[in-house]
């Protein structure tokens, strides 16, 4: 299984990446230092996810970035993704693990202490915790938890975590102080006029926050 560095985790959104496109945005972001790229395309078919996923995998090969497929086991397996990410309302983690096998990373979204405490570290490799803030990027997001909520949830999570939801580079210090390994963003990189620079700024902020 690939080792995952959660420092700066880009979640690709087809709408927000429409200008440059998802592959170009991901490549620019990885040049800027993004460590993980997740393909999250809610409206696409499995065939479309496989097509974009293959292009992403090719573009990112040799960069060291980790490629994660959101909520589509078939597409994750077809492209040979490094990992799969599931939500609380998707399939159970044990079922996802059984279907992807032991070599693929498995991430899960966690929005509460209860969900964090249920995480089995033998099955799940990392959690995405949030939303820290309300965000227009995810219409159906749960109640924002803030940095106090983040810290509280992270005390119960048995695996490394990335914070998500309305996060910008100026939140790096609070993200790291709350106990997260890194920050996951969509709009702070997708749709920015210079995604490489936007990524580099967030990477620098996370690096500095750790000191
Ligand atoms: N899950 C919780 S909030 C969110 C997801 C996918 C969207 C975060 O988007 P942004 O633009 O970084 O606020
Ligand atoms: Mg989902």
Image (cartoon, helix red, strand yellow):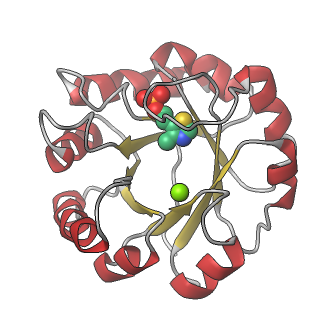
* Camera-side residue of 16 and 7: 16
Q: Outermost residue toward the top?
A: 170
Kindly identify the residue that appears in the image at 36 percent across and 41 percent down. Answer: 34
Vertical arrangement, residue 183 with respect to residue 202, above or below: below
Vertical arrangement, residue 119 with respect to residue 190, above or below: below
Q: Is residue 182 left or right of residue 55?
A: right
Residue 107 visible, this orientation: yes
Q: Residue 94: x, y in percent?
A: 70, 78
Kindly identify the residue that appears in the image at 23 percent across and 29 percent down. Answer: 195
Residue 183 visible, this orientation: no
Q: Which of the 4 quarters of the picture holds residue 46?
A: bottom left
Q: Residue 59: x, y in percent?
A: 17, 58
* Camera-side residue of 168 and 207: 168
Kindly identify the residue that appears in the image at 48 percent across and 64 percent down. Answer: 71
Q: Residue 151: x, y in percent?
A: 80, 30
Q: Which of the 4 quarters of the picture holds residue 123?
A: bottom right
């Amino acid at each position: 299984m690939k080792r995952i560095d959660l420092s700066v985790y880009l979640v690709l959104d087809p709408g927000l990446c429409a200008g440059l496109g998802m592959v170009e945005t991901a490549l620019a972001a990885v040049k800027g230092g993004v460590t993980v790229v997740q393909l999250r395309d809610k409206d696409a078919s499995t065939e479309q996810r496989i097509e974009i996923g293959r292009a992403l995998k090719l573009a990112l090969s040799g960069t060291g970035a980790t490629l994660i497929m959101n909520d589509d086991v078939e597409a994750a397996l077809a492209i040979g993704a490094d990992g799969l990410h599931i939500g609380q309302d998707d399939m159970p983690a044990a079922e996802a693990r059984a279907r992807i096998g032991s070599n693929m990373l498995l991430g899960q979204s966690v929005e509460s202490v209860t969900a964090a405490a249920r995480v089995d570290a033998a099955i799940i490799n990392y959690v995405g915790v949030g939303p820290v803030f309300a965000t227009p990027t995810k219409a159906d997001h749960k109640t924002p938890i803030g940095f106090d909520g983040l810290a509280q949830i992270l005390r119960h999570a048995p695996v490394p975590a990335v914070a998500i939801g309305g996060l910008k580079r100026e939140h790096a210090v609070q993200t790291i102080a709350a106990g997260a390994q890194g920050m996951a963003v969509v709009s702070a990189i997708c749709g920015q006029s210079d995604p490489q620079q936007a990524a580099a700024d967030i990477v620098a902020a996370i690096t500095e926050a750790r000191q």
